[in-house]
Image (cartoon, rainbow, N blue to C red):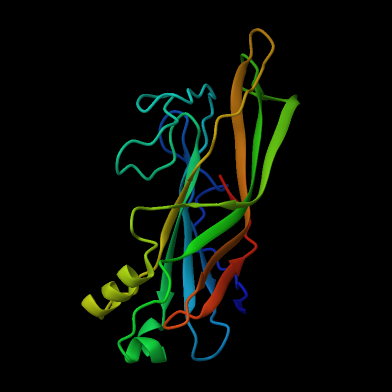
Amino acid sequence: MRRALARLTIALLAGAGLVLAGPGAARATTTVEIPAATADGISATVKFYGAVVPRHYNPDPTAPFGDRKCLNTYHDYNPTPGCGGFKLDVRLHNVRNQPGYLAGLRSSVYGFQAYADTARTFGCLRPDGTFDHATGFVVRTERQALLPTYYYTDANWIIHQHREYPDQDFGPHFYMNFPAVEVSCPEGTTPTQYGLKVTNVQVTIADDNVFGHTTWSTPGPFYA
């Protein structure tokens, strides 16, 4: 398998890494350039953004609406205010110069997949709003499969977009909406998600015709 190793370049990370965007939400945008494995291969731009970190953590796993929402509704591909998550967008470069693309081939597989390691820190807020580190704990996942954003991970849709709009580059889009976690706090304190860390992001495909058997990787980390 050809591997494209990451060269990390942060395009924008506002302030200390967070831009507060309303109650219970934290958003940061970080862009990473991943060079092609070979001089004539496909490189990628990966954007981490749209992170939701519920500061007052009170999720409802059955709720499709409201501040405690954890369920996505029809054509809803976003992290929820109750459970939190993030988005990952990818743009692929030099696709139009690949032999299979020039030959007019379609992809031999449906599409792209993405994975990441995640770490969510939880705990309790004191009445003055400070975090009680003695209550903190971390929920970790390794090689968490990210969720596809609609049909934007379809390899043939991406090929079509490159042909339809020759002055733009396209790639797959993903998101993560986390499952709920139980956080128990002493009386007078408030459950909170204190932070989110995402590492070891991989975007991969095994296509015989256009994109090759390729994994674009970046260690990160991405914070929210």
**Which residue is pictured at 43% across the width and 28% down the height?**
23
- Give the total of numbered labels: 0
Vertical order, 29 against 192 (above or below): below
In the image, residue 136 lies at what x, y percent? 72, 29
Residue with the most extreme front position: 108
Residue with the most extreme top position: 187
Quadrant containing the N terminus in the rendered view: bottom right
Q: Is residue 111 left or right of residue 6?
A: left
In the image, residue 186 lies at what x, y percent? 69, 11
In the image, residue 197 lies at what x, y percent? 62, 47
**Which residue is pictured at 62% across the width and 33% down the height?**
194
**Which residue is pictured at 64% across the width and 14% down the height?**
189
**Residue 126, quarter of the rendered image:** top right
**Which residue is pictured at 41% across the width and 84% down the height?**
94
Vertical order, 52 against 5 (above or below): above
In the image, residue 7 lies at what x, y percent? 60, 73
Q: Is residue 160 left or right of residue 121?
A: left
Residue with the most extreme left position: 164
Quadrant containing the C terminus in the rendered view: top right
Q: Is residue 216 left or right of residue 219?
A: left
